[in-house]
Amino acid sequence: MNITLRPNNLDAFWMPYTANRSFKASPRLLARAEGVFYYTPEGREVLDGTAGLWCVNAGHGRREIAEAIKAQADVMDFAPTFQMGHPIAFEAAARLAEFTPDGLDRIFFTNSGSESADTALKIALAYHRARGEGQRVRLVGRERGYHGCGFGGMSVGGIVANRRQFGAQLPFVDHLPHTHLPEKNRFARGEPEHGAHLADALEDLVKLHGDTIAAVIVEPVAGSTGVLVPPKGYLRRLRELCTRHGILLIFDEVITGFSRLGAGFAAEHFGVLPDIITMAKGLTNAAVPMGAVAVTREVYETVLEGSPGGIEFFHGYTYSGHPLAAAAAIASIRIHQEEDLAGRVRDLAPYWQEAAHSLRGAPFVTDIRDCGLIAGVELEPVKDRPTERGMRVLQRCFDDGLLVRVTGDIVALSPPLTIERRHVDRIFDTLDRALRKEAA
Ligand code: PMP
């Protein structure tokens, strides 16, 4: 549909995570998308350096996905999955179970990453109660983690600004330290050397709280807070500690899932298997909203067997397994498999890494981090005015035909996995130009 913007019709939409007043004073609009490009309403081409919001992993405008959604809409728009079922939701779960790491093959559908995080936390609580360990109610997140904006995800999340405005949080939550050690790991390529010991903070929490911890939730690579790549050995250590102390380990793979790091999921890339994986975004290539939680058979069966009969898990969304989303997920998973997007990432990642690190020495660049097809370029903030430089660089890039995402003064890049080397060059050349203009 071609909608033209009427004067004043910016008013009604209360935009999420956006400075509404300054945005509406000078909006940046995207009206069309194809392949690795967006187009503004005036038809100006903008290279998508962020796969939308880390989500359009297979590139924009995939006909296979659009046709699958249309075909399903023609057959059946909606049917409940409470006390009823429809074939395509079961089919989507089965296909997804084949795509998730071996051992995590029971799937709960949600509509977003936020819902996936809250669902995973509730599964963890239900699991322990089912095992007669109802005292395990504490949830552990990590500083600088992002798990969406539901109450659970917000509380275990480690972004203070996202909590400050609201005051009330979930009780019984602790945070591990984040893994960003700039003094030791600055300009590290891939996984940094130093910091595996930071996982040991979990041991301290166990000493403090005994057997009351239910779960630890972390992003394998923290995305939204500026691409924080786990130090070598860190995730393995976290896994060992969780196993030793009877704590469930949840990987939030909303960003790292769906081939982004060069494997279906980060769990496979890092060779560390959690008990629960949350996902969203790339699941449907973002064509329609959908999220999911994959759990081990042991977790699933424990929750089911712990229930005396009837409903085993008092949780679910009207749109869990929505037919149109299920159709999109099946088509999207097929693209990942048939086009071997993970293999593509593995091939391109060295070139991507080299290109990203070529910005070392560009004005204001204080650190560069990368993993798979993600990169974070950290900039020196304007004194006493954090985020100002980041937003100015975003605007300069946009004016110069590149979409980047900034989080504070860190530029985050996560293009569609279908990009080619010439697009990689264009991303970092444009960013370099923006930084030089910023310095001029
Ligand atoms: N977890 C992670 C790791 C994310 O990056 C995000 C979104 N950027 C979410 C959860 C929340 O997802 P959603 O916005 O779909 O609720």
Image: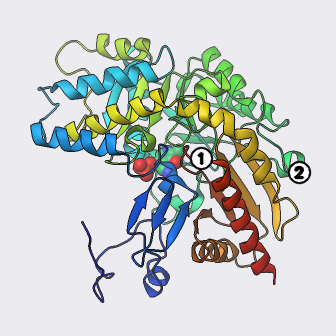
The correct choice, above or below, for 137 with respect to 435 in the image is: above
Q: Is mark 1 within 8 Å of ligand 1?
A: yes
Residue kind at label 2, given as amino acid type: Glu
Q: Is residue 213 left or right of residue 119?
A: right
Label ID, residue 203: none
Residue at horizontal 28 percent and vertical 83 percent from the top: 9
Residue at horizontal 59 percent and vertical 28 percent from the top: 263
User: Percent from the top left, x then y, of residue 278?
Assistant: 46, 34
**The one of 395 and 183 positioned closer to us in this rendering:** 395
User: Percent from the top left, x then y, of residue 349?
Assistant: 70, 40
Residue 147 visible to an observer of this rendering: no
The correct choice, above or below, for 13 with respect to 142 in the image is: below
The correct choice, above or below, for 162 with respect to 138 in the image is: below
Residue 67 visible to an observer of this rendering: yes
Q: Is residue 115 left or right of residue 356?
A: left
How many marks the image carries: the answer is 2
User: Percent from the top left, x then y, of residue 132?
Assistant: 40, 14
Q: Earlier in the sequence, mark 2 or mark 1?
A: 1
Residue at horizontal 60 percent and vertical 48 percent from the top: 223
Residue at horizontal 52 percent and vertical 37 percent from the top: 252
Q: Which residue is mark 1?
A: 145
Task: Give the quarter of the figure containing the C terminus.
Answer: bottom right
Callout 2 touching callout 1 (CB < 8 Å):
no
Residue 211 image-quadrant placement: top right
Residue kind at label 1, given as amino acid type: Gly
Residue 109 image-quadrant placement: top left
Q: Which residue is mark 2?
A: 183
The correct choice, above or below, for 139 with respect to 270 in the image is: below
